Amino acid sequence: MLSRFTMAYRTGYTGVIMFKIVHDLYWLFKGVRVFALVGESGTGKSFRAKLVAQKYNIDLIIDDGLLIQGDAIVAGKSAKREKLYMAAVKTALFHDKTHRDQVARVLQKKRWKKILLIGTSEKMVRKIAERLQLPHPHKIIKIEDIATREDIERAVQSRRVEGKHVIPVPAIEIKRSYPRIFYDSVRVFLQKNLTSPGLTAPKLYEKSVVRPEFSKRGRVAISESALSQMVIHCIDEFDDAIRIKKITVRSDSQGYRLTVVIELPFGTQLSGNIHNLQQYIIDNIERFTGILIEEVNLVIDRFSN
């Protein structure tokens, strides 16, 4: 028999799905399309964002917590201004309610048809879309599709050695909003292989190069023991009859992957319950830490009396 908590969780989860369907239909009727540019950190996504926007006639860009239209920052706050890496991740994911509500309100008021979300993984851009009440991306562009391997390697090397990041707006905009992290500016011509039909002349874009405080301190990640303790707490809160045998934590550029070996009481109803537990772990850890949980694998070792 499911606990009252589990049944309430299921009901709430269904409500969230229905809300998402209604929202997606709302944007669909408005003719809105969401694009995403995905690639590992430091591979040059922000550097090429304007080129992608030009090719697909995209009106708005979401990049590291900022809403950008043309050469102006119209809403949001930059993750680049954060002093700690984890705080920067939370900002990029619109973890703070005041931050995401401000950007969502501007999106509701502005007239636009296409928006580009930039992230390190497909899950990240889906999460951004959900938090800004947008449909999931209908077209995902990988950095490897628009940049050569040599270009990507140079970008990664620059990030690793010099800690340089790019914001796709002119220097004057960054100097006005974030003068303390401004480093340099660069101008780039739109390449021919990315031009849109009917474009008669190359266009010049200016991008700002910044050096955030967190890039000087190195990447900060959550420890395996701390993450394991969070998993234990989530499972105990979900159903204290479940016993944990082993937790394995792996991380990569897309997020954390967890494998949890559990022991279930004999007679436990599995249909839907395991999926709910997986989602409960993901939702709670992401909400309280801001990190991305790419997957949670639950392995049932045995049933106990």
Image (cartoon, helix red, strand yellow):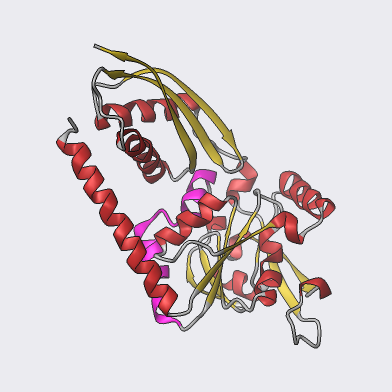
User: How many numbered dots are placed on residues in this image?
Assistant: 0
Residue at 53%, 63% (x, y): give it: 137
- Residue 82 appears anywhere in the view: no
Whether residue 6 sits left or right of residue 162 in the image: it is left
The quarter of the rendered structure image containing the N terminus is top left
Magenta span main SS: helix
Dividing the picture into quadrants, the one containing residue 186 is bottom right
From the top left corner, tell me how far across and down residue 43 is, in percent.
Answer: 71, 52
Dividing the picture into quadrants, the one containing residue 29 is bottom left
From the top left corner, tell me how far across and down residue 133 is, in percent.
Answer: 39, 65
Residue at 27%, 52% (x, y): give it: 14
Dividing the picture into quadrants, the one containing residue 109 is bottom left
Nearer the observer, 4 or 219: 4
From the top left corner, tell me how far across and down residue 153 is, in percent.
Answer: 80, 48
- Residue 47 appears anywhere in the view: yes
Residue at 40%, 59% (x, y): give it: 131
From the top left corner, tell me how far across and down residue 239 is, in percent.
Answer: 24, 28
Q: Which residues are magenta?
A: 84-110
